[in-house]
């Protein structure tokens, strides 16, 4: 949980630039992407940590009552979070290697220290 900054983002096998100030805010059940100067994009998520690799599913509801589930995997090591997500209706990724042409991506995030934790 907390606020995270992008270290890298690879989509369809190609590394993408991430705007300065772009952040992800994670709560108990919501994953919200905040882009500078744009509306935030939020989605629900569920975790299945006992699996190997650990599984995450993002639930996007663009059309109320018709949620779309995007399968993924994740790895949390200290203050670094890696997520490889796939498009709805496609197989769950098996590892963190980006695949050219896939619809989905690999993001590497780093936790932003809470101001109370600094100095």
Image (cartoon, rainbow, N blue to C red):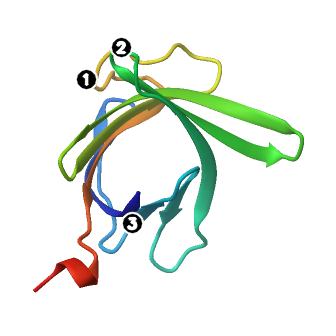
In the rendered image, the quadrant that contains the C terminus is bottom left
Residue closest to the eye, 71 or 38: 71
Assign a secondary structure to mark 2.
loop
Q: Is residue 11 visible?
A: no
Q: Is residue 36 visible?
A: yes
Q: Position of residue 99 (x, y in %)?
A: 33, 21
Report which quarter residue 115 is drawn in: bottom left
Tell me the CA gap for discs 1 and 2: 9 Å
- Identify the residue shown where x is 60% and y is 60%: 41
- Identify the residue shown where x is 40% and y is 16%: 51
Assign a secondary structure to mark 3.
strand
Q: Does residue 87 sit above or below 111 in this rendering?
A: above
Give the labeled residue for mark 1.
97
Give the labeled residue for mark 2.
94
* Marks 3,1: beta carbons within 8 A: no
Residue closest to the eye, 88 or 119: 119
Q: Position of residue 116 (x, y in %)?
A: 25, 83
Report which quarter residue 95 is drawn in: top left
Q: Position of residue 35 (x, y in %)?
A: 47, 69
Tell me the CA gap for discs 3 and 1: 22 Å
Give the labeled residue for mark 3.
23
**68 sits to left or right of 111:** right
Q: Position of residue 44 (x, y in %)?
A: 63, 47
């Amino acid at each position: 949980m907390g606020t995270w900054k992008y270290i890298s983002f690879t989509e369809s096998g190609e590394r993408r630039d991430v705007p300065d100030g772009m952040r992800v805010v994670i709560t108990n059940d919501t994953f919200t992407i905040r882009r500078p100067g744009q509306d935030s994009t939020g989605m629900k998520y569920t975790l299945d940590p006992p699996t190997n690799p650990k599984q995450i599913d993002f639930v996007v509801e663009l059309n109320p009552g018709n949620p779309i589930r995007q399968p993924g995997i994740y790895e949390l090591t200290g203050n670094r979070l890696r997520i490889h997500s796939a498009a709805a209706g496609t197989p769950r990724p098996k590892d963190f290697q980006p695949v050219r042409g896939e619809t989905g991506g690999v993001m590497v995030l780093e936790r932003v220290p809470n101001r109370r934790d600094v100095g």
